[in-house]
Amino acid sequence: MKIGDKVRFLNTTGGGIVKGFQGKDIVLVEDEEGFDIPVLIRETVVIEPANEAQVRQNLKPTNEVQQAASVNKPEQKEKEYIPEETKEGELLTVVLAYLPVDIKNISTTNFECYLVNDSNYYLSYNYMSRTDEGWTRRKTGVIEPNTKLFIDEFDKTGLNDMERVCLQFFAYKQNKPFAIKNVYSVEARIDTVKFYKLHSFRENDYFEDEAIVYPIVRRDVSEKELVVSAEEIEIAMKQKEQRPRIQPIAKKDKKDILEIDLHIDELIDSTNGMSSGDMLEYQLNKFREVLEENKKNKGQKIVFIHGKGDGILKNEILKELKTKYKSYYYQDASFREYGYGATMVTIK
């Protein structure tokens, strides 16, 4: 983010032009009425970068004294930006997220598309959608490490062009060695019907607001679509004709889903004398204990009921799964049965 960039506020309506910075965390944004508003940098997103001419104009001295001073003053090099890195960020995780502009008016509101780069790499990307005539470029550019970037805004009439999207990108680091990653081109089918249903927008790890999230790459592995060719369908039909019409039923040995309620009042009789930190650690110890007891039960599905609340317990559980239990697969449990308050883990 630099002076002259046009930004949008993430947690409220509005935005403006970046006029300056206060410390490491605060950006000054000039709104449409000319007021400078101090905002946390993490609560803004760049929607239109400033070009070089705009930057020079914003930084140009306004009188002869300043011009003379700038001639005699040695030029200062701009401090090099070094993005913060995380251990898990060495594996690429990239998602597309769709958020309603006004969730209270879901039938008429516009929608925003964001690209989320949950990795330590810069991504040079090309985001496209497909129509009957072919693929159409919607946005190209570069997204910095561990950031989310506003990509696009569209209304309900634009949903017809969003049923198939494709994200292409390659990853790299600047001014330091890095591991070579694959070049990705991942297509995704967007269920546009979900945009008409309020419950389709769900709590997620990347936004305070509820969103529809489509993973593109998880831990260096791209999401795969099930694509069946005409030849495969023909072979399958011939095999079907050769099978006897009446066959005995062979029931599979399906493991029951194990449910663990992590609400503190379900784990202990009394919380007297326990701080909130003590209760959280008790719940996490129960979570770890259950996983350790079932680590040899390959394919076992365990639903941890943590509730929605303020999301602290859920976030701690996800952190554990991303660091200590990386080989296990996890996802939101059935919304119909648990709402937003449960995570299902599959032992791998």
Image (cartoon, rainbow, N blue to C red):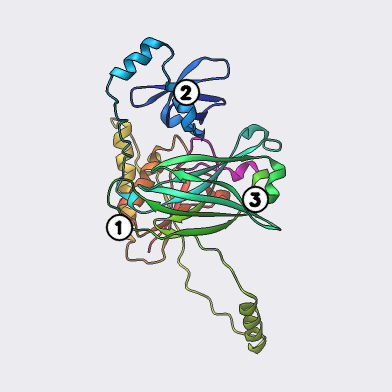
C-alpha span from label 3 to label 1: 43 Å
C-alpha span from label 1 to label 2: 61 Å
Does the segment drawn in magenta span residue 292? no
Say which element carries label 3. Answer: helix
Is disc 3 surrounded by few (<14), some (14 to 19) or many (20+) residues within 10 Å? some
282 relative to 189 in the view: left or right: left
User: Disc 1 marks which residue?
Assistant: 292
* 32 shown above or below 140: above
**Residue 153 image point, x, y percent:** 61, 39
Q: Which one is in front, 344 or 194?
A: 194
User: Disc 2 marks which residue?
Assistant: 57
Marks 1 & 2, CB-CB < 8 Å contact: no
99 relative to 313 in the view: left or right: right
Res. 344 image quadrant: bottom left
Is residue 28 visible in the rendered image? The answer is: no
**Residue 90 image point, x, y percent:** 33, 52
* 222 shown above or below 232: above
